[in-house]
Image: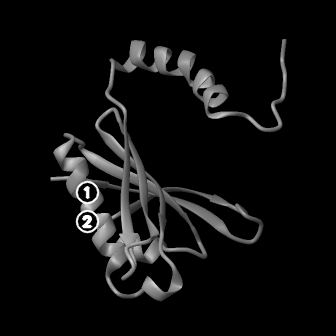
Amino acid sequence: MIETLPTPTDADLAAILVPLAAHNDAAGGPTERHKIAIVHRDDADAITGGLWAEVSYRWMFVKYLALPPTAQGKGHGRALMLAAEAEAVRLGCIGVWLDTFSFQARGFYEKLGYRVFGHIDDYPPGEARFFLFKRLA
C-alpha cells in the first residue's frame, strides 16, 4: 500500500531511512552518523542562529547556517564554519559539503575555500542552487 502522510512524524521519517541506510551500509560499509549543532547566542544567552550539520561516510554535510541580520558581517558565520570544520576533523572527516542559493552565500563559502561541484538552474525559478565542497587537510 502507498500512502501520503500530510504531517509525518519524526518516527515516520526515520522509518523511511531504515532500508536506505541498510542498503548504503551494505554497499559503502557501515558508518557512524552524527548530528551536529553549533549555536550562536546573543548577549542574553538566547540562541539566535547557528549551524546544523550531519556526518556520515567521513563527510560532513552542512544542512543549515543561519544568523539574524544583526549578527551578519561580524565574523560569526566564519566562526561557525571554522568550528564545524574543526568538529569534522575531530570526527575523522575528509571533507565538508553544503548547498546554497544564488541569493544566499555562495561567495562567502568560496572565500572559505569551498568549490562549486554542481548547480541546478531555476531552483527557485529565476535563481540557482549551488553545491559546494571542501576537502579537509
Along the viewing direction, whichever of 19 and 116 lies nearer the viewer: 19
Above or below, comparing residue 91 to residue 130 in the picture:
above
Above or below, comparing residue 7 to residue 27 in the picture:
below
Find out whether the residues at labels 1 and 2 contact each other: C-beta distance under 8 Å. Answer: yes
Disc number for residue 82: 2
Along the viewing direction, whichever of 43 and 91 lies nearer the viewer: 43
- Residue drawn at point x = 33 percent, y = 51 percent: 96
- SS label for mark 2: helix
Q: Residues within 10 Å of mark 1 (few under 14, many from 20)?
A: many
Question: Farthest front residue?
Answer: 44
- Indicate left or right for 62 with 90 as reference: right
Mark 1 lies on residue: 85
- Residue drawn at point x = 54 percent, y = 18 percent: 18
- Residue drawn at point x = 32 percent, y = 65 percent: 81
- Indicate left or right for 30 with 87 as reference: right
Instruction: Give the quarter of the figure containing the N terminus.
Output: top right
Above or below, comparing residue 120 to residue 69 in the picture:
above
- Residue 125 found in image quarter: bottom right
- Residue 117 found in image quarter: bottom left
- SS label for mark 1: helix
Residue type at mark 2 is Leu
